[in-house]
């Protein structure tokens, strides 16, 4: 067998093989009582924006695309989401101290205003997650008011 | 005798006015402004103060916070990151068990938040804007901390109204001279003393 052909075969075996490595998915159907939207009684328009632009990386209830089941893409996504949830997990928001909730709301507002979030590497593929100027304003106004009310 | 009485009366009135002045500066009541006559508004501003007990428990936290503040005044993100790391470590070493039990929960919330903010600053050497965001949050944590624990030096809480799209930002300094950590060179002079934190 030619070396190139052998290399191709090995890569194919590896690629197929890694699909069978069990991976923990982040998906959890149940919305916990500590969820940001539950705790704060978030109106539907705000909830829709949050679910579309934030919850896929910052909650336990993401909507994963089909290719998240294909490795190594899935692993990459997984590590990304772990980091996102470590910074801010909307599903656990209600369990944060009021001080932490206020800090997180401040950070959310400035990250959105500065266009740092949602990540451009994410919106590049997920066009629907991009925030229009109008939605940015609606969302940041809402989050600022919520912070002041806590 | 009559003159003494008048002087005494005037002294009482002006004392009352300055006390009211303090009150409004603390942000407790906007209405008290309207009680002041125009003449009294022109008097030099009395800086409100609070007094906290003397304590050495926060020395390393304050040292590193102030180092961090100076690094941001100097627009030095790298230095801010290393001070942030030292601050993170100092907060981690704070011994909660030595504090009164009813205050421990609140202190834990403050320390957790401060730690997270310090961590962000330590990991964002190349993003000074991001460091400043967390530095602003951190200032609130440290102030609330020393109100409970006490401090080892006089501090000033300063306020610059221009920070964060005119939402304003606060910070702590060991000096009442304004050197703004949010803008660095750009708007070094933005700010005024909100409150002096004295040590008993």
Image: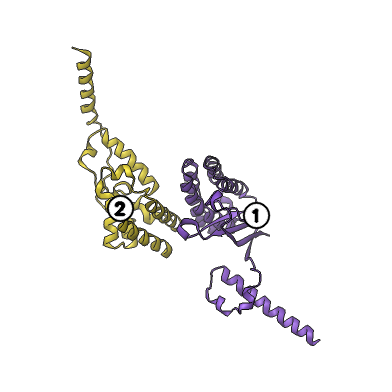
Nearest to viewer (mark 2 / mark 1):
2
Asked if badge 2 and badge 1 are on a common chain, one would say: no
Residue neighbourhood size for the residue with mark 2, other residues' Cα within 10 Å, grouped as few (<14), some (14–19), many (≥20): some
Tell me whether the residue at label 2 lies in contact with that at label 1, contact meaning CB atoms closer than 8 angstroms. no
- Identify the chain of the residue marked 1, using the numbered disc in the image: B
The residue lying at 51 percent from left, 53 percent from top is B136
Residues B94 and A88: in front is A88
Q: Position of residue A45 (x, y in %)?
A: 27, 61
- Identify the chain of the residue marked 2, using the numbered disc in the image: A
Q: Give the number of the disc on residue A131.
A: 2
Task: Residue lying at the far front in this picture: please name it.
Answer: B186
Q: Which chain is painted in purple?
A: B
Residues at marks 2 and 1, CA–CA distance in whole angstroms: 43 Å
Asked if residue B55 lies left or right of residue A21, the reply is right
Residue that mark 1 sits on: B175
Q: Position of residue B152 (x, y in %)?
A: 66, 53
Tell me the SS state at disc 2: loop
The residue lying at 64 percent from left, 76 percent from top is B40
Residues A13 and A144: in front is A144
Eyeballing the image, is A14 above or below B160? above
Residues A12 and B90: in front is A12
The residue lying at 39 percent from left, 47 percent from top is A87
* Residue B12 appears in view: yes
Asked if residue B95 lies left or right of residue A53, the reply is right
Chain A image colour: yellow
* Residue A31 appears in view: no
Residue neighbourhood size for the residue with mark 1, other residues' Cα within 10 Å, grouped as few (<14), some (14–19), many (≥20): some
Q: Quadrant of residue B54?
A: bottom right
């Amino acid at each position: 067998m030619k070396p190139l052909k052998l290399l191709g075969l090995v890569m194919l075996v590896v690629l197929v093989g890694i699909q069978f490595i069990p991976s923990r998915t982040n998906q959890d159907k149940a919305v916990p009582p500590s969820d940001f939207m539950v705790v704060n009684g978030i109106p539907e328009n705000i909830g829709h924006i949050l679910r579309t632009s934030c919850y896929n990386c910052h909650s336990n209830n993401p909507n994963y695309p089909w290719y998240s089941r294909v490795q190594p893409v899935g692993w990459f996504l997984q590590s990304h989401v772990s980091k996102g949830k470590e910074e801010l997990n909307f599903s656990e928001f209600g369990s944060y101290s009021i001080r932490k909730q206020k800090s997180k709301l401040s950070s959310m507002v400035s990250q959105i205003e500065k266009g740092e979030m949602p990540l451009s590497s994410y919106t590049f593929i997920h066009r629907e997650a991009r925030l229009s100027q109008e939605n940015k304003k609606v969302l940041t106004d809402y989050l600022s008011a919520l912070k002041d009310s806590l | 005798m009559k003159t003494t009485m008048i002087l005494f009366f005037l002294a009482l009135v002006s004392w009352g006015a300055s006390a009211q002045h303090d009150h409004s500066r603390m942000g407790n009541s906007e209405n008290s402004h309207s009680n002041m006559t125009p003449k009294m508004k022109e008097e030099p501003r009395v800086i409100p103060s609070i007094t906290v007990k003397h304590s050495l428990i926060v020395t390393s936290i304050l040292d590193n916070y102030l180092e961090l503040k100076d690094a941001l005044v100097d627009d030095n993100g790298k230095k801010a990151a290393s001070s942030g790391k030292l601050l993170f470590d100092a907060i981690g070493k704070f011994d909660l068990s030595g504090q009164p039990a009813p205050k421990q929960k609140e202190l834990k919330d403050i320390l957790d938040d401060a730690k997270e903010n310090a961590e962000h600053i330590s990991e964002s050497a190349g993003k000074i804007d991001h460091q400043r965001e967390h530095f602003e949050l951190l200032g609130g944590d440290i102030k609330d901390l020393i109100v409970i624990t006490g401090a080892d030096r006089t501090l000033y809480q300063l306020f610059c109204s221009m920070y964060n799209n005119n939402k304003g930002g606060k910070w702590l300094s060991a000096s009442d001279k304004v050197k703004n950590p949010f803008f660095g060179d750009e708007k070094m002079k933005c700010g005024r003393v909100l409150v002096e934190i004295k040590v008993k």
